[in-house]
Image: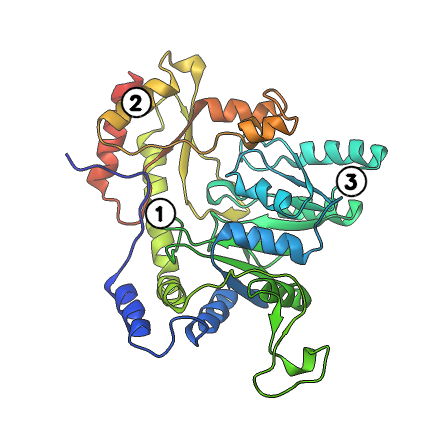
Amino acid sequence: MTTIPYSRQDVSEDDIAAVAQVLRSDWLTIGPVLPAFEAAFAQRHATAHAVAVSNATVALHLTCLAMGIGPGSRVWTSPNSFVASANCALYCGATVGFVDIDPLSRNMSVASLQAKLIQAQAAGLLPDLVIPVDFAGQPCDLQDIRALADQYGFRILEDASHASGASYQGHPVGSAFADATVFSFHAVKILTTAEGGMVTTQDEALANRVRSLRSHGITRDASAFEQPSEGAWYYEQQTLGFNARMTELQAALGLSQLQRLDNMQAKRSALADRYDALLADLPLRLPTRLPDRKLAWHLYAVELIPARTSTTRAQVFDALRAADIGVNVHYIPIHTQPYYQRLGFKRGDFPVAERYYEQALSLPMFPAMTAAQQDRVVACLRSALA
């Protein structure tokens, strides 16, 4: 029986041709395709600037640095995410805090954020940066978080690694409310460059700082030189940066994939609609749909309802894996990881995120998934729950 993965890349013949064209060209890195991809991504997401980097973890790290995050800074994020959403602050020497999630959206709870901000203000410990995470492709409550940012003086770095092409209040994710937004192009994300990431922002100065940091802190722009140019070969390292560039090969794949983004998302949305209908009678809490936002459907994550079934999440997981169905769990709460427990966090700190994790299960979801494959997933899930 063929294994059904929880997700997989969707690579077309046009994608392959685009990469092959770069391989036959004069440029494998720092060529014309990368800026073309950045420009197209910025246009699709209605933002002034898009800066491509080697992966989304790097994108988070460099954007934190570009925002001035360093030793003494305080950064808050969601515990319901991959560890990169918190690690990026630690890379900069900052301290990390977490804000519990909303039980319906599974994103950062605005009420919990507001309560934590009131306590932090009284203690003189307000955050410098908040990183809300668009879990599973569900945009966060960005308007409310923006209002709190304006009131309490922190910046917003939206982690939209799951949300390429999603929208919030009619605005493409990455265009409004946040000071900057990060996207992931990992193999199983909405669109892929195999590995890769993008930073979008309306702030030209911030975009330029990220561009500098991705390439060793070096500039070849004569108008920005701090010392007289010595010739056409001259460049200056003006800050301590990194080698975090995206290659032409990756950019070519991303640019080609971007042209199919709406089509791939339509397929994901249709699968989500079908899951909603097929699973409606099962003891599961299905993903929440909010009227003011369009989901990207990177994941279709359900929760078992213990009051309606005696079957455990582990039993369901094992049964589906035994049937060659690649279910997964997203995510183990970051604060419960051994590294973060050594920083002082413990189980019980963020109970809503922990309760979600205890019952969470991500079902297979990818554009090429067939109705027959989806029927097989549902049949096995129904059997396991019975």
Is residue 178 in sight in this rendering? no
Between 103 and 53, the one lying in front of the other is 53
**As drawn, is 79 to the left or to the right of 327?**
right
Q: Secondary structure at mark 3?
A: loop
> Is the residue marked by circle 3 packed among few (<14), some (14-19), or many (20+) residues within 10 Å?
many
**As drawn, is 8 to the left or to the right of 308?**
left
Q: Which mark is residue 238?
A: none
Q: Which mark is residue 126?
A: 3
Instruction: Provide the residue designation for mark 2.
Output: 318
Q: Position of residue 23 (x, y in %)?
A: 30, 72
Q: Secondary structure at mark 1?
A: helix
Q: Position of residue 57 (x, y in %)?
A: 52, 49
**As drawn, is 365 to the left or to the right of 149?**
left
Instruction: Provide the residue designation for mark 1.
Output: 268
Q: Quadrant of the C terminus?
A: top left
Number of the front mark, 2 or 1: 2
Q: Secondary structure at mark 2?
A: helix
Whole-Å distance between the Cαs marked 3 and 1? 39 Å
Amino acid residing under circle 1: Arg
